[in-house]
Amino acid sequence: MCYKCKITKKGNSLNNSKLQNQPKQLRALLILKKQSILISNLHKYKISTYVLNILLRKKLCYIHQSLIKKKNWKHLILTKNIYYKLTNNNILKLKPIVQNNTKFKSFVIKINTIYDKEEVYIFLLFEYLKKGLKTLILVPNIDYIYNLSKFLQKRLQIPIDIYHTHITETKKLILWNKCKTEEAAIIISTSEGIFLPIINLGIIIVNEESNLSYKITKKWTFNTKNLAIMRSYKENIPIILEGNELSLETLHNINIKKFNLITINSKYESFFVKKINQTLIDINHKQCKGIFSIELIEKVQKYLLNNQQVCFVTDNISNAITVLQCSNCNVIMKCQYCHQYYEYSKHYQELSCKYCFFKKNEPFFCTICNSSNYILIKYNVSLLKDSIKKIFFDFPIIHITNDSTMFLNKHLINKFQLKHNNPCIILGNNDTLTKYKLDKIKCLIFLNIDVYFRSNNFRSPEYFGQKYYSTLRKVSNFYTINTEVLIQSKMFKNALIQKLITSNYEKFSSTLLKIRRKYDLPPYTRHIIITIKSKKYEFLTMFFKKYYKFLITYSLNYKNNLWVVKSDIIYFNKYFSTFYTTILLVHPSVIFLKKLSKQSIIFINTKLFFKHIQLTFDMDPI
């Protein structure tokens, strides 16, 4: 639909005394006299809707509704022939997904290169579009949407709709109505797109299923991947989980034959074979300049002097060391002999220098302003820049960030890429480095990986392994021949770190699954975290005791060994002015935990003070 504004014959008299004192209405009338205007183009002619409504009331113009014939995407697909660049073996592997009798099935596709990934998407989308069915593609971030939509628009040349949180409310409403009709063909969306009311949905594709951004914890707590599997089960359609570094839960489901694994063998893999040399540097009781070991500094200098680029991965830099800063003059405590930052130890309450191994007690007064107020500051990116400038002062530093200044940083990166043999130092985390093709990097440096293997979260080694191997895989797809990866660690003899360097992700994940099975951790058991909230302390303590007894008696009645871990500490949230505590439930059966959660809701409704208590269940805690 499009609407046109045309001036009538009755409104041609511009000498009307009512309009002579209103120049905006006269100007709009003069423009409408010359040509008709679409309502969507009113802002181009600087005509407001208020002025247009006044002219309509005075019957000086009228709105004419005209229909625009739109091309049907089904007709375009049926008259099109697309050449697939996949091999015959890969097409035979993908044919069980696109069969007519295919109902609900969970497929996991493992793809090595980006080129094969794009061709697999084209094959699957084209086969389902020929049947007249729609497709929903879920991506982890907004950046993935535009890269994928541009490629699909060139190859398929059909309408592709985009849905994410940053689009306007009117665009969301238009797409919501499109999903109920036959206009929308392919919808690429973030996690919010799983709730779209799409009719004739043929398949759901989850891009990079192991990405952590699929777990939403802001307004509602839900896992997009699990919701996508549930929706495909209810609508009786297949679902595809795509990725290379698969999560341990999907690997476990593949082992028990719950998911069907399809590996795509790449014909481009021989063109992008790249040797990656991984070296582990032990910094335990060794001389360091700040957080850089002497061995690391010597290797980085060799690369920079040979006109090559070096990249520092800045993930978890804040957990490397803790420094002491004066709150009055903002001076960070430095060693009096080597002028390096002191590392502060809370346990011993002392300052130590890693370069000259000098130690001293925590000072009472600042040496500059004589202030007694100190602040503990974690090592951040700005301190990392300062320390790099002091050591490698002849070379430029580029910091890649996720914010709006990325356009400037991207321009600088392209500038350095165009100039061959131009050395520089690049700072960035794993997520930003994988988005951009930094094909001139010869050395990748991971400064602090011990945090992942010493963390209280048992999933942190899995997350780091996924990020680590994904960066290595994407670096190996670039055109450079050799790359060296330097890793600093104090846990030199750790079995998982040694496995990380000497093997691939499949062997690393299999060792993690063995450890999970040994200690009865997910995916071999299921966890639920229940948070109990109340604004009154007395109601919370009373309900907590009764609810804990209910959990034990319920598990004994059904002869199930339920592991209940309760917190004896009751916390207070100042922002919401509420008291809260948590309970962890562990059991191998999901069905039993779901029944228990339903019975707990019934239990809380039977109590008289249920209005003062609030329960929240997290079925997939991270």
Image (cartoon, helix red, strand yellow):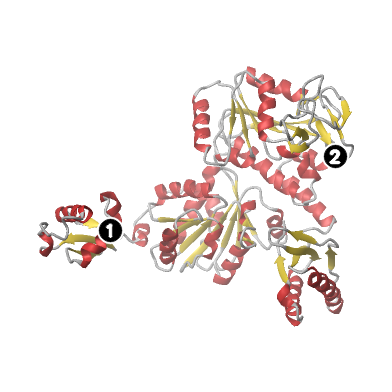
Label 2 vs label 1, nearer the camera: 2
Q: Quadrant of the N terminus?
A: bottom left
Q: How many marks?
A: 2
The residue tagged with tag 1: helix, strand or loop?
A: helix
- Residue 94 place in picture, x, y as percent: 54, 56
Judging by the rendered image, the residue that carries numbered circle 1 is 39
Judging by the rendered image, the residue that carries numbered circle 2 is 346
Mark-to-mark CA distance, 2 and 1: 67 Å
Q: Residue at x 85, y 79 (%)?
A: 557
Sequence-first tag of 2 and 1: 1
Q: Amino acid at mark 1?
A: Ile
Report whether residue 428 is seen: yes
Residue 565 lies left or right of residue 528; in this view the side is right
Q: Quadrant of the C terminus?
A: bottom right
Q: Amino acid at mark 2?
A: Lys
- Residue 159 place in picture, x, y as percent: 39, 56
Picture layout, residue 150 above or below residue 312: below
